[in-house]
Image (cartoon, grey):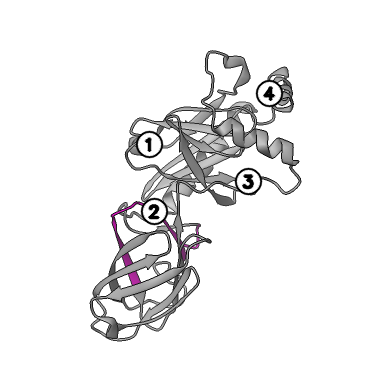
Amino acid sequence: MKFLKTIALLVVCSAFSLSYSSAANITPMPLNKDGRIKLIHYKPNSVIKFVGHYLYNSIIEFAPDEKIETILMGISSGWQLHPEGNRIFLKPINDNAETNMTVITNMRMYFFEMHAEEAKGVDDPNIAFVTKFVYAQLITDFPSNASSSTTGAMHQRVDTPPDLSKPSLYNFRYQISGIAMSIEPVLIFDDGYFTYFRFKEMNGSIPAIFAVNDKLEEAMVNYRISYGYVVVERVANRFTLRNGKDVICVFNDGYYRQSDTFKEIMNITNMS
């Protein structure tokens, strides 16, 4: 049964990878199978290619705590723009819509290469209804029912490097599926609270990370980089790593395991 289950999971993973179109690193990626909700992994000093579609409105969404201060365009007559808070509502309106755009917020500067084309219809997967930015330094909120002492201890854990000289404290039972060497982790483990990923090129392109639930629905997770690890502040049964056309599925074989390891972790947390 376990063998058949593993095969089924690999088939699902393969189906995920086929459902996403290829894209360059600075091109928005589809967030789900629909394709019209897209995301961009933020990289400072990079140029993002944005394609608008005539007759259709799009939204560019920055971090929740960002506020747009200035928008500059090479040729503004080709676009209709309306900034509000951390979002830009926009659509191309003239044939001469190819230009560049610089957006300055209270936190960052963004550079866009703007293009426009005709859509095949409202269901065209190339249309960007919403394009959201993902930031490596953002931290996922803890569950609302977590006590303040536990939350504080969890924050303290992420600021402390994992002690791999005590392997019994960690779950290393992870498997991966997919052929994408550029985003394949070289090490994955968790401590019952956080999941740690190490990549061959930590200074290179870090993929977007999604948690996958039992319904095979993906939810984007934020992460931080600490002590040479990409640290996701949660543990999940499955993750999907994406960077353009590259897809890796990660399976946590120890997710449902209950052992003295995690009891020991809980005791350490309560004592800290």
> Tag 2: residue type?
Tyr
Q: Are marks 1 and 4 in contact (CB under 8 Å)?
A: no
> Tag 4: residue type?
Ile
In front: mark 1 or mark 2? 2
Q: Quadrant of the C terminus?
A: top right
Q: Residues within 10 Å of mark 1 (few under 14, many from 20)?
A: few
Q: Are marks 1 and 3 in contact (CB under 8 Å)?
A: no
Identify the element where label 3 is drawn. loop
Q: Are marks 4 and 3 in contact (CB under 8 Å)?
A: no
Identify the element where label 1 is drawn. loop
Sequence-wise, the earlier of marks 1 and 4 is 1
Q: Are marks 2 and 4 in contact (CB under 8 Å)?
A: no
Label 2 sits on residue: 42
Q: CA distance from mark 1 to mark 3?
A: 22 Å
Q: CA distance from mark 2 to mark 3?
A: 25 Å
Q: Position of residue 74 (x, y in %)?
A: 23, 76
Q: Is residue 50 magenta?
A: yes
Camera sees residue 75: yes
In this view, the residue in front, 179 or 197, is 197
Residue 179, which numbered label? 1
Q: Is residue 271 left or right of residue 32?
A: right
Q: Is residue 9 magenta?
A: no
Sequence-wise, the earlier of marks 2 and 4 is 2
Q: Quadrant of the N terminus?
A: top right
> Tag 3: residue type?
Asn
Identify the element where label 4 is drawn. helix
Residue range in magenta is 32-51
